[in-house]
Image (tube, rainbow, N blue to C red):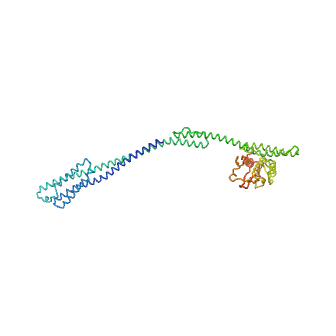
């Protein structure tokens, strides 16, 4: 590129210098031609003055009119002045004509002196004729020299005109050839530039797009020369580093996901384990057999719940498997909150429950997991001695379960993110609880929403369809 632009620049500078020299030469010739125009006028004026001088002599000699004496003197003076003015313009090879013209003019003046006026009254006719012939010959020779001087300065101007025309043509031809050379060089170096720069840049652009798409296995290879070759090698090194960083990042993300998943398992298992521990603390060998049988049944259900939670969290991305059955919502909510009170987290909780009795179809264990999670979260964020309200009511064609706390509320910017997996701002939380609840509710064809204002607590609302059949639930939740 540097050589190409350098050559084009040198050719352009040389052409400009050549044209400037020619322009200067033509300008000098034009200025000289202006001076030569003055010389031509002076030459023509000299030839005219020589002839006018003889005309007045002839009139004086033939007519005897003495008024021509002053005219003769005037034109004789003009001839002398014309010779002085024309002398600088006459070429060296024609300067002898000036001396010859001066000589003939002096001889003509000596042969006829206007001061000798009486001589014009001579009666000797033969003498007058002889003098007229001599004067006419001198005048003819003087006119010949004057005309030759006029032609000499005119030929000089013609030569200057030829030189100016030739220089102009050379300038036009040289400028045209220079322009053609610059155009040819530009085309040649453009093609070379396309091959040496644009094509490698296109390869690098395609490689950058592949890298941007995550294809870090692609390589540019040796492309171009010089800086472009170094850039292609840097691209390949960058691709290797990006691929290695991606491998490390994926490994770290996997490890983090495993850690979060393990923490989520522990979080979700804590509720049923707390219930199991609460019942174990109150159970005794002397208890009524019927009571023991009921409590053992509860323990078995909660243990099965633990097993299913672990399975669900380990297979978080797979569709949920629901075990559908008909149940009464009022009894379901009362039994769920009873179990929560028996757990270690719910022994000091103040729960206020109001429920309308409606029969629904769903997975009791899964829905109990949702309610227990929402109630536990509400108890944790509410101040001590503050009640947590649980409401169950019909709302159109749905049954709404509302869990209201007295906590600090959820900021507006976080309300759309709290259901995302692993998103949490609570110390020790994993962010899996609400996302699992959302998945369970969606599997039942329902919705899970939150209504909250900062400083005024939050209300989580679970809406379940009342008239939904088992086939509808299967289509919504993917039940096999």
Q: Quadrant of residue 59?
A: bottom left
**Relative depth, front residue between 282 and 365:** 282
**Residue 355 seen in the figure:** no
User: What residue lies at 26% left-to-right and 47% top-to-bottom?
Assistant: 92
**Relative depth, front residue between 45 and 249:** 249
Q: Seen from this angle, which residue lies furthest front?
A: 384
**Relative depth, front residue between 480 and 267:** 267
Give the image location of residue 223, x and y in percent. 54, 39
Q: Seen from this angle, which residue lies furthest top?
A: 222
Give the image location of residue 331, x and y in percent. 82, 51
Q: Is residue 147 left or right of residue 404?
A: left
Give the image location of residue 123, x and y in percent. 11, 58
Q: Seen from this angle, which residue lies furthest left?
A: 124
Count of labels in the image: 0
Give the image location of residue 46, x and y in percent. 24, 54
Q: Where 74 sits versus 293, above or below?
A: below
Quadrant in which the C terminus is drawn: top right
**Residue 214 seen in the figure:** yes
**Relative depth, front residue between 211 and 9:** 9
User: What residue lies at 54% left-to-right and 39% top-to-bottom?
Assistant: 230
């Amino acid at each position: 590129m540097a050589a190409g632009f350098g050559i084009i620049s040198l050719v352009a500078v040389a052409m400009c210098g050549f044209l400037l020299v020619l322009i200067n030469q033509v300008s000098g010739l034009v200025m000289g031609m202006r001076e030569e125009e003055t010389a031509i006028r002076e030459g023509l004026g000299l030839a005219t003055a020589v002839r006018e001088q003889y005309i007045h002599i002839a009139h004086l000699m033939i007519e005897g009119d003495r008024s021509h004496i002053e005219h003769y003197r005037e034109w004789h003076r003009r001839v002398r002045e014309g010779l002085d003015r024309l002398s600088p313009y006459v070429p060296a090879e024609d300067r002898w004509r000036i001396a010859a013209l001066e000589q003939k003019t002096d001889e003509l003046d000596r042969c006829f002196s206007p001061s000798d006026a009486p001589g014009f009254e001579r009666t000797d006719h033969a003498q007058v004729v002889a003098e007229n012939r001599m004067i006419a010959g001198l005048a003819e020779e003087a006119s010949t020299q004057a005309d030759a001087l006029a032609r000499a300065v005119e030929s000089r101007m013609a030569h200057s005109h030829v030189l100016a025309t030739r220089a102009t043509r050379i300038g036009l031809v040289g400028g045209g050839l220079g322009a053609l050379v610059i155009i040819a060089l530009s085309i040649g170096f453009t093609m070379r530039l396309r091959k040496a720069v644009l094509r490698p840049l296109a390869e690098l652009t395609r490689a950058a797009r592949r890298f941007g798409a995550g294809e870090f296995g692609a390589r540019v290879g040796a492309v171009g020369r010089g800086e472009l070759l170094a850039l292609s090698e840097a691209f390949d090194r960058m691709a290797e580093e990006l691929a290695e960083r991606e491998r490390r990042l994926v490994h770290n993300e996997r490890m983090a996901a495993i850690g979060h998943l393990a923490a989520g398992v522990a979080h979700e298992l804590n509720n049923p384990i707390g219930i199991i521990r609460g019942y174990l603390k109150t159970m005794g060998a002397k208890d009524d057999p019927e009571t023991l049988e009921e409590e053992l049944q509860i323990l078995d259900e909660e243990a099965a719940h633990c097993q299913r939670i672990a399975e669900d969290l380990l297979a978080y991305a797979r569709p949920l498997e629901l075990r559908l059955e008909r149940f009464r919502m009022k009894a379901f909510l009362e039994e769920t909150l009873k179990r929560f009170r028996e757990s270690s987290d719910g022994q000091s909780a103040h729960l206020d429950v109001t429920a309308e009795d409606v029969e629904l179809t769903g997975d009791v264990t899964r829905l109990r997991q949702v309610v227990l999670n929402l109630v536990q979260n509400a108890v944790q964020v509410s101040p001590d001695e503050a009640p947590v309200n649980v409401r169950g009511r019909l709302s159109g064609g749905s049954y709404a379960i509302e869990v209201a706390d007295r906590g600090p509320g959820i900021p507006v910017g976080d309300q759309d993110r709290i259901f995302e997996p692993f998103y949490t701002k609570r110390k020790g939380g994993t962010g899996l609880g609400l996302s699992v609840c959302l998945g369970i509710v969606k599997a039942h064809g329902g919705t899970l929403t939150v209504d909250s204002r900062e400083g005024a607590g939050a209300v989580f609302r679970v809406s379940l369809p009342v008239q939904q059949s088992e086939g509808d639930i299967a289509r919504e939740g993917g039940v096999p």
